[in-house]
Amino acid sequence: MTVSLIIYSHEIQEIIMHIEPGVVDGAKILLSLATAATAFVVSSKHITSHVKQNGVASLATKTLLATVAVLVFFEVFPKQPVGVSEVHLILGSSIFLLFSLAPAALGLTFGLLIQSLFFAQTDLPQYFMNITTLLVPLFAMAAIAPKFIDPNTAYSDLTYTQTLKLSAIYQSGIVAWVMFWAFYGQGFAVETFVNVGVFAAAYLTVIIVEPVADLALLFAAKRLKPISSLFVNTRLYKA
């Protein structure tokens, strides 16, 4: 049992951004088309709003930067060992704070697509599951953020507690979706419960670490200001 948990924990960390082939297959994959389509509709609304407020150039520039950041997070950043598992720092809250919601959503969409096309072709059939897993928690985080971040607070002035809450919302959402896809695809067998539990316990430790990365990036941005709103979120420096 110990050996199987170690092996599964090593594999499940890949599922955090890439639902592995075979976890959900056959006709069940069709559900991911519906969930991804819903996420894309929500994205389009935020994209339209961003363009109206900031212009096409702002969206294009920030999307490019967000996409590059996502590729770095996915492909370059090392995997962090947590007990018998390893996890990735996705830093979804960071790209949201630095580039705003629409560019962050597009950055995740394009970054994951580029990775699937050129670096991990075996993950392409699972793309719609993976993008759902990344985007829906992002929208949830953005919707809940105003409840604990005052509208007059610039993002560069956020506290660790506030960034911790952002990370907790985003990462918990990702964990919830990964668990959903695992149970949806594999059923409610005891082994699935055990393995998903090991994964969740290991991955949630990222919630403690990620806010530190958020604050470090925000601090760096504050020290480098002024940075044109063409490149970063207008709320980074002022509410």
Image: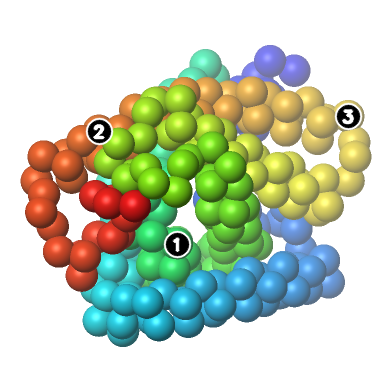
Task: Single out the mark in the foreground, 3 or 1.
Answer: 1
Residue 216 circle label: 2
Asked if the residues shown at circle 2 and circle 3 are in contact, with their CB atoms under 8 angstroms apart, the answer is no
Q: Of the two numbered discs 3 and 1 on the same chain, state the one appearing first in sequence.
A: 1
The percent position of residue 85, horizontal first and vertical second, equals 53, 26
Q: Residues within 10 Å of mark 1 (few under 14, many from 20)?
A: many
Query: Mark 3: which secondary structure?
Result: helix
Q: Give the distance between the C-alpha atoms of the residues marked 3 and 1, in whole angstroms.
A: 38 Å
Q: Residues within 10 Å of mark 2 (few under 14, many from 20)?
A: some
Residue 101 circle label: 1
Residue drawn 75% across and 18% down? 1
Task: Single out the mark in the foreground, 2 or 3.
Answer: 2
Q: Which one is nearer the viewer's eye here, 238 or 78?
A: 238
Residue 190 circle label: 3
Residue type for callout 2: Ala
Residue type for callout 1: Leu
The percent position of residue 110, horizontal first and vertical second, equals 41, 70
- Residue at the far front: name it: 152
Q: Is residue 165 above or below residue 228?
A: above
Q: Residues within 10 Å of mark 3 (few under 14, many from 20)?
A: few
Residue type for callout 3: Val
Q: Quadrant of residue 216?
A: top left
In screen coordinates, is 29 left or right of 114?
right
The percent position of residue 184, horizontal first and vertical second, equals 83, 52
Asked if the residues shown at circle 3 and circle 1 are in contact, with their CB atoms under 8 angstroms apart, the answer is no
Q: Is residue 237 above or below residue 88?
A: below
In screen coordinates, is 125 left or right of 226?
right
Q: Which one is nearer the viewer's eye here, 51 or 190?
A: 51
Q: Quadrant of residue 115?
A: bottom left
Residue drawn 41% across and 75% down? 50
The percent position of residue 176, horizontal first and vertical second, equals 70, 42
Q: Give the distance between the C-alpha atoms of the residues marked 2 and 1, in whole angstroms.
A: 20 Å
